[in-house]
């Protein structure tokens, strides 16, 4: 029997002796796989092999033992080692289909192709994290030290409890904290049993699409609107039906008349993405009436509802008494940071078990420790404090952006201010392409998303300027580079 070797800790680099053993093992395994030793063939005695390879006999014995455990060879007592006789399949030529390089189009299922194609179209290579990329909060201002302190507060009993498989609906403490937060912050009355913790709003929408829609079902979306929503719906086999957006938000009456079969509508009523308008009360009520009359659903994507800077904050659609068919989706991607991957959906009680089990089917549940820290973060008032700081900071940054662009463009580019959100939109004449200027901005190192990227049928064109996640110096530098493009235009 070969001498037992001490296990080598994974974190330390393998010593020269172990490296030699692994090299001999790989050589022998390759020889067997390439047919130098046929199935059933006797391997040269270990002493001979050691001499030929210039290593110790122990090294060869270690390699042989590993090959034996893995099934490549069999050892016969007193008679050395033989290649396992039943390994003829090792040398069978690959079938034609396997030998060709894999082509996703040929390999993926029809459903898989739909998912992959729509997802790829939605998510081009990640844009650089530079001004004026939209959607980024001020991560530099995130209270990481406080977060770590809260994480350390958990005693060993709590940590052990969180290390188990957990409720897919989310930690009770977090669901409780979210329900209370929604009341204070968004005027929504719900109880913790209606809150399902999700991995961001993207997962919430995926669950809605998978559980409430059948392939081919029609869904009304805003045009322009959020591509992440559209891609998810398409990937889940739904038909996406665009409805134009004007100064009062989505044109609800025209939309439901044009698409009478729609089973779901997805809206961003507090701060329409990306145009930034609010859905008027009249249209809110029309939308709720439509859902009620048809038995359809309204998804309220409240992605940045907390960032309203004026004295009066518009409450969520779900706060209206007629909102029985509204599924309210919230995220911590903007209020905290997107790397957390935490959000939630508020559901009617009766739907919660189906949604929670569906979530368990894909990823079981969100990481327990992170949920616990977030629950504490909200319950101890840190979320409110953090938001207060951000609600002061973002309007200042917006002001810097507007002034810097006006100055750098010699007055040619004047963005209209907004008392909401984390980005501004500057529209150009309808139908004029916005792509060329975005490409020139990118060459100058500035991300300037063209409005056309967010449209389906709409002819609205323009550019999006994210400001929340960049300090004043970075905003000014980018404004100088982009302002020049306007000054020259
Ligand atoms: C309209 C809209 N909804 C939702 C999200 C957030 O997605 P998630 O919560 O999955 O990070 C974004 C992010 O940019 C958004 O723009």
Image: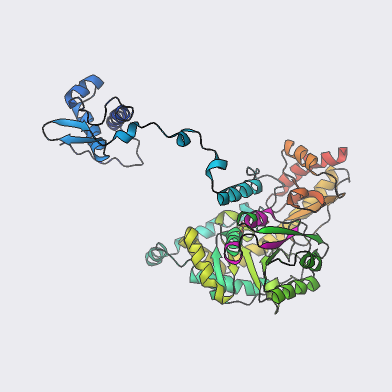
In the image, 98 versus 73, the foreground residue is: 98
**What are the residue bounds of the magenta stretch?**
209-233
Residue under the point 88% across and 49% down = 429
Q: Residue 370: where, in percent of width, then height? A: 50, 60
> Where on the picture, by quarter, is residue 439?
top right
Question: Which residue lies most toward the left here?
Answer: 78
Taking the image as drawn, is residue 137 in sight?
no
Q: Please tell me which residue lies in front, 187 or 218.
A: 218
**Which quarter shows the N terminus?**
top left
**Residue 207, position in %: x, y?**
57, 63
- Which residue is pictured at 45% across the width and 64% down the height? 153
Please identify the quadrant where the C terminus is shown.
top right
Classify residue 132 as left or right of residue 61: right
**Ligand 1 falls in which quarter?**
bottom right
Residue 230 sits inside the magenta stretch: yes
Q: Note whether 83 is above or below 482 in the view shown.
A: above
User: Does 81 sit above or below residue 329?
Assistant: above
């Amino acid at each position: 029997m070969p001498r037992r070797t001490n296990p080598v800790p994974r974190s330390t680099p393998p010593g020269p002796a172990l490296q030699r053993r692994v090299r001999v093992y790989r050589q022998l395994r390759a020889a067997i796989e390439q047919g130098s030793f046929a199935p059933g063939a006797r391997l040269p005695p270990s002493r001979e092999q050691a001499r030929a390879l210039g290593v110790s006999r122990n090294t060869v014995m270690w390699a042989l033992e590993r090959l034996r455990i893995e099934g490549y060879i069999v050892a016969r007592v007193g008679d050395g080692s033989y290649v396992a006789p039943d390994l003829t399949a090792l040398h069978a030529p690959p079938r034609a289909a396997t030998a060709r390089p894999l082509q996703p189009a040929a390999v993926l299922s029809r459903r898989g192709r739909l998912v992959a194609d729509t997802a790829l179209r939605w998510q081009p290579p990640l844009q650089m994290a530079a001004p004026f990329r939209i959607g980024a909060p001020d991560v530099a201002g995130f209270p990481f030290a406080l977060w770590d302190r809260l994480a350390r507060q958990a005693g060993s009993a709590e940590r052990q409890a969180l290390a188990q498989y957990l409720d897919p609906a989310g930690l009770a403490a977090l669901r409780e904290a979210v329900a209370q937060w929604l009341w204070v912050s968004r005027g929504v009355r719900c109880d913790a049993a209606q809150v399902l913790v999700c991995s961001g709003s993207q997962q919430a929408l995926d669950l809605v699409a998978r559980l409430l829609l059948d392939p081919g079902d029609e869904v009304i979306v805003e045009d322009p609107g959020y591509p992440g929503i559209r891609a998810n719906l398409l990937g889940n086999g739904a038909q996406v039906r665009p409805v134009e957006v004007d100064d009062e938000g989505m044109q609800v009456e025209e939309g439901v008349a044009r698409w009478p079969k729609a089973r779901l509508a997805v809206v961003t009523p507090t701060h329409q993405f990306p145009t930034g308008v609010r859905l008027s009360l009249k249209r809110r009520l029309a939308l709720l009436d439509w859902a009620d009359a048809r038995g359809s659903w309204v998804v309220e994507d409240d992605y940045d509802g907390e960032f309203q800077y004026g004295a009066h904050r518009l409450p969520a659609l779900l706060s209206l008494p007629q909102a029985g068919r509204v599924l309210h989706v919230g995220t911590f991607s903007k209020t905290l940071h997107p790397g957390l991957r935490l959000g939630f959906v508020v559901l009617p009680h009766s739907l919660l078990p189906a949604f929670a089990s569906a979530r368990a089917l894909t990823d079981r549940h969100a990481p327990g420790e992170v949920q616990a820290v977030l629950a504490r973060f909200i319950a101890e008032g840190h979320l409110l404090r953090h938001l207060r700081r951000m609600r002061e900071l973002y309007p200042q940054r917006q002001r810097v952006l507007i002034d810097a662009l006006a100055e750098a463009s010699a007055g040619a580019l004047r963005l209209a201010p907004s008392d909401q959100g984390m980005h501004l939109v500057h529209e150009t004449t309808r139908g004029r392409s916005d792509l060329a200027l975005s490409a020139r901005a990118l060459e100058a190192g500035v991300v300037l998303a063209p409005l056309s990227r967010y449209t389906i049928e709409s002819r609205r064109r323009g550019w999006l300027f994210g400001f929340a996640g960049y300090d004043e110096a970075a905003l000014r530098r980018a404004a100088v580079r982009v302002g020049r493009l306007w000054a020259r235009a």
